[in-house]
Image (cartoon, rainbow, N blue to C red):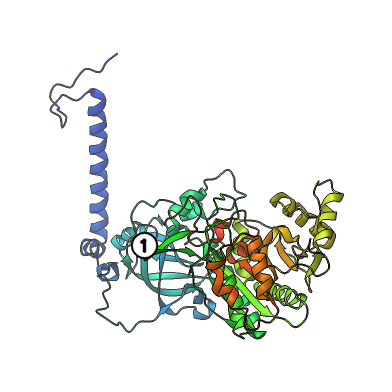
Amino acid sequence: MSDKPAEDVLGPDGNPLSKKALKKQQKDAEKALKKAAHRQQEQAQNPQAAEQEKEDYAKDHYGQVRMIQSRDKPDRTLLKVCELTRGLADQKVWLRGRLYTSRSKGKSCFFVIRQQKWTVQALVSVGEKVSKQMVKYIANINKESIVDVEGYVRTVPQKIESCSQQDVELHAEQVWVVSSAAPRLPLLIEDASRPETEGDLAHVNQDTRLDNRIIDLRTQTNQALFRVQMGVCRHFRQHLEQNGFVEIHTPKIISAASEGGANVFEVTYFKTKAYLAQSPQLYKQMAICGDMDRVFTVGAVFRAEDSNTHRHLTEFVGLDLEMAFNYHYHEVVDVIGNMFVAIFKGLQQNFAEEIEIVHKQFPAEPFKFLEPSLRLDYREGVQMLQEVGVEMEEGDDLSTPNEKLLGKLVKAKYDTDFFILDKFPLAVRPFYTMPDPEDTKWSNSYDMFMRGEEILSGAQRIHDPDFLLERAKLHEINIEKIKAYIDSFKYGAPPHAGGGIGMERVTMLYLGLDNIRKASLFPRDPKRLTP
């Protein structure tokens, strides 16, 4: 049964309204009349409030500030969110941060200000200094906008579990937008911060994170994660400096592949070709020949490997070291083992809060290690694998699955996530590796492992130029391209050894992450060259 059109009432399009549409129009008109009558009644009872509402008495306490172009130097101290504690109770403060979340409730608006990994709850309520218009404005500020807030620090009767500053909140009286974020974000910080254990809720996939890395880096987890990574570098440097090492900086554009293989990026260098360094290896050794005795470097390393795995990058940060020794390369192995212990202990002592934050989103078992570090002979490792049914010969290199299995076997037997494997087969090591003096099937080389994955490869280097030349020819390396390297040993070279570490891989494995891209600020792999 159809509605009969009304005869006299027309809609916006000029056509007669149906009875249903007419009825709705009448209801809307009645609501509007009631609302107007209610407002008139309020104004009659409180004419002052009505006048204030018209004028917006708080108009000088909120809004968008003029673009900061270094015009002014206001006499104002901006506190950090992490500084807001009970000790500042009832004091008026200014702070700057990002508007993380907001929700309006009647005549009030609750919002959270985030600054790196710290957050604080703020509140504005209609009163003498806060108008309805101000509350409405704040409630509609785009998430992730940068704001300056002035207000009183107030203690709270119950802890605010959702914020890092749990004992206080900020009662705001001024809110100014310094830099407005776009209304639509490519990903929500709340989704990007969600623990992996909450599988039934929205998560952000890895490609979306990396495509929008600037926003992804704002999560509390990433703020903590890259502080842990800073700690890896800090304790690497500190320990080596305390043990007589000198930090050096080596070339990244070189004339020949540093590892002698094909996995190298070729670049145009004026009228000739050059390569991006796969390792600072040759230059560390040349520094030793230059009587620097003990050296280390922190810098970019490039590997043109088409490996799309959870642990490979085409560019990573190398933590490399080299040192002269007196009689046995184990002098160097002991120094490196002690250095890793210093890193692990330093992270435990100085970055416990950050580690806990990361593990809230990415749960993992705490990292375990022994002091001194566990050292096994390569043949012992092979035997442990053979005992559980792995078919491999003593001279074979370790495959990735066998590395992981060995890590589990070592953890079960020795209760450590870190260990050293010594005396690798010579056939699987670079040309400059010193052979074992008793059996040339083996070499004076070693790898170090975290949670069953290699994080350092090292060896005693050949320091005799004639023997080095012989080994280079055996590996079919173009002698002309490494002439400067070989010549550096002609004038007397001390016995020396060292190793190279991947910073991102150490971070990943210490924290128990599942992918190295989580531990790389802006990762580069065979499929990713931006951002």
Q: Is residue 453 above or below residue 120?
A: above
- Residue at the (29%, 70%) spot, across then down: 61
Instruction: Tell me which corner region of the image, top left, top right, bottom left or bottom right, holds residue 294.
Output: bottom right
Instruction: Tell me which corner region of the image, top left, top right, bottom left or bottom right, holds residue 377.
Output: bottom right
Q: Nearer the viewer, residue 362 or 474?
A: 474
Q: Is residue 250 above or below residue 15?
A: below
Whether residue 315 is visible to the viewer of this picture, yes or no, is yes
How many discs appear?
Answer: 1
Q: Nearer the viewer, residue 48 or 323?
A: 323
Whether residue 461 is visible to the viewer of this picture, yes or no, is no
Q: Is residue 146 above or below residue 391?
A: below
Q: Nearer the viewer, residue 358 or 428?
A: 428
Which residue in the protein does label 1 denote?
145
Q: Secondary structure at mark 1?
A: loop
- Residue at the (62%, 78%) spot, across then down: 489
The percent position of residue 261, horizontal first and vertical second, equals: 58, 58
* Relative horizontal placement of residue 164, taking residue 123 as reference (left or right): right
The percent position of residue 110, horizontal first and vertical second, equals: 43, 61
Q: Quadrant of the C terminus?
A: bottom left
The percent position of residue 506, horizontal first and vertical second, equals: 63, 64
- Residue at the (50%, 77%) spot, across then down: 83
Label 1: how many Cα within 10 Å (few below 14, some 14–19, many 20+): some
